[in-house]
Amino acid sequence: MCFLSVGALLWPQGASAQLQPYRAEYALRLGTAVNAPRVGSAVQDLALTCEGWHLRRDVKGELALSATWKLNVASKLDGEEPVAGDSFRYRTMQIQNGAERETHGKVQRAGNEWKAEIVSPSGPAHSLLPSPTLMPVALIGRVIERLRSGPAAATFPALAFDAEGTGETFRIDVTPVSASTLRSRRPADKAVEVPGKSWAAQMSFTPGHKPDEKPLFTIRALVFDSGVLDRVTVDAPMATVTADLQSLEMRKPPTCPPSPVSAKGF
């Protein structure tokens, strides 16, 4: 389910025009075979207002671990990230075989650090995150920015906030790859047209506090300059899961009044 967290890599002010609001639906399958069984679905909804981004993710899956034991899981994220990219408010819901776990929190930049306040069933927790840590929408923007700059600038590490997991950070190493290394689209899936330029990329995820360890998982995907992902393959030690775009609705950005500074002509 983690592929949407890419999702779901730094979003400076100049990168906002490259991202576009959209709603995308994906089919999740276990394995890379053409006839791999479908095990779930995912929706990413990225809305934009004059105040900032509103990110919603809804991932559902069912795994048959044995003839009599099935694992039903779901993950929901509802988050808000301002245009300035200096904070992130969110709420998550994790469900496993009917058992729910809700978490909500706020991450706010404070000088050279990020202050995180997270409330979970275990109680409230406060922590400091390193200055380079990126919030979810900012993460997508940085990946696009670097891929757009060409191969020499595209290979880089980044620290990203893990809102849907531990509430800590991942180190993400991004590397451009040949499009031929990505899976072909399954013949049974209808073609979904995604506008804009695209790049094939690989992303490796390692716990931020253990950057020298082996990655927990890697992702290969086709990354579009709108922020949309397709032909996603997640390789983890226990399984390989794929995600393929099933439908896409691109939305127009809002028309916002000029800021007080720009109105004065500065």
Image (tube, grey):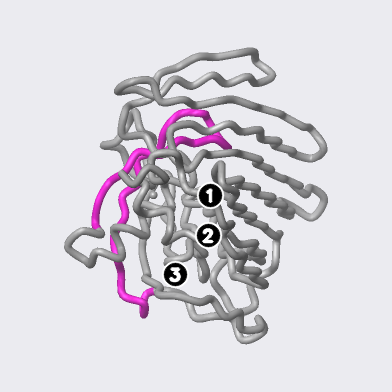
Residue positioned 64% across, 70% down in the render: 248
In space, the residues marked 1 and 2 are separated at their CA atoms by 46 Å
Residue 149 location in percent, x, y?
A: 24, 64
Tell which circle, 1 or 2, labels the residue nearer the N-terminal end. 2
On screen, residue 194 versus residue 110, left or right, reads right
* Badge 1 density bin: few <14, some 14–19, many ≥20, Cα 10 Å: few
Residue, far left: 152
Give the answer, above or below, for where 217 lies relative to 208: below
| Figure quadrant of the C terminus | top left
In space, the residues marked 1 and 3 are separated at their CA atoms by 34 Å
Disc 1 target residue: 257
Q: Which mark is residue 240?
A: 2
Span shown in magenta: 155-181
Disc 3 target residue: 222
Residue 89 in sight here: yes
Tell which circle, 1 or 3, labels the residue nearer the N-terminal end. 3
Q: Which mark is residue 37?
A: none
Say whether marks 1 and 2 touch (CB < 8 Å): no
Give the answer, above or below, for where 60 lies relative to 183: above
On screen, residue 71 versus residue 211, left or right, reads right
